[in-house]
């Protein structure tokens, strides 16, 4: 699953790179950074969830909540740091972070299509 989602994310980055090359988009770095942070966040979430449900039997909810709060705090700190530099860069970062959901959506649509056949 992770490999497929990351493949779709790389496809999105490739398409954005082509678009930015021809349209001279200045905030492409922030968009790619947002997509990369979202992908790393997704990877950490996958590993923590897998660890909690396979290894830990005592109070698994606490580790999930600690992981959630830590990941949200780190993303917010990065976004605030970018927003201090430039507001348009911060919006581009948030847009790039949101693009990760397109990769997840593409994966789920492909999975659903394969199950129907």
Image (cartoon, helix red, strand yellow):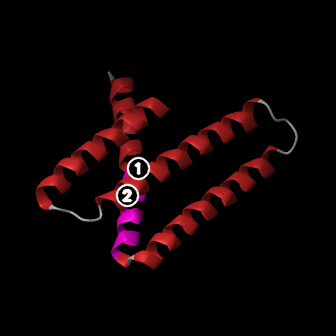
* Helix, strand or loop for the magenta stretch, by majority: helix
Q: Residue at x 41, y 37 (%)?
A: 6
Outermost residue toward the left in this view: 22
Q: 12 left or right of 55?
A: left
Which label is found at residue 16? none
Outermost residue toward the front in this view: 85
Q: Are marks 2 and 1 in contact (CB under 8 Å)?
A: yes
Q: Nearer the viewer, residue 38 or 117?
A: 38
Tell me which segment is drawn in magenta. Answer: 88-100
Per the image, the residue denoted by label 2 is 96
Return the x and y of residue 89 as percentages of the image width and height.
Answer: 36, 70
Q: Residue at x 19, y 56 (%)?
A: 20
Q: 100 left or right of 23?
A: right
Q: Residue at x 48, y 33 (%)?
A: 2
Per the image, the residue denoted by label 1 is 100
Of helix, strand and loop, which one carries label 2? helix
Return the x and y of residue 31 as percentages of the image width and height.
Answer: 35, 58
């Amino acid at each position: 699953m992770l490999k497929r989602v990351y493949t779709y994310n790389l496809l999105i980055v490739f398409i954005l790179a082509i678009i930015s090359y021809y349209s001279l988009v200045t905030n492409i770095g922030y968009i790619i950074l947002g997509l990369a942070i979202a992908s790393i966040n997704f990877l950490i979430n996958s590993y923590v969830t897998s660890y909690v449900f396979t290894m830990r039997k005592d109070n698994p909810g606490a580790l999930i909540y600690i992981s959630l709060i830590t990941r949200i705090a780190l993303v917010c700190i990065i976004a605030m740091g970018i927003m201090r530099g430039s507001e348009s860069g911060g919006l581009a970062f948030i847009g790039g972070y949101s693009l990760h959901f397109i990769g997840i959506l593409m994966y789920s649509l492909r999975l659903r299509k394969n199950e129907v056949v």
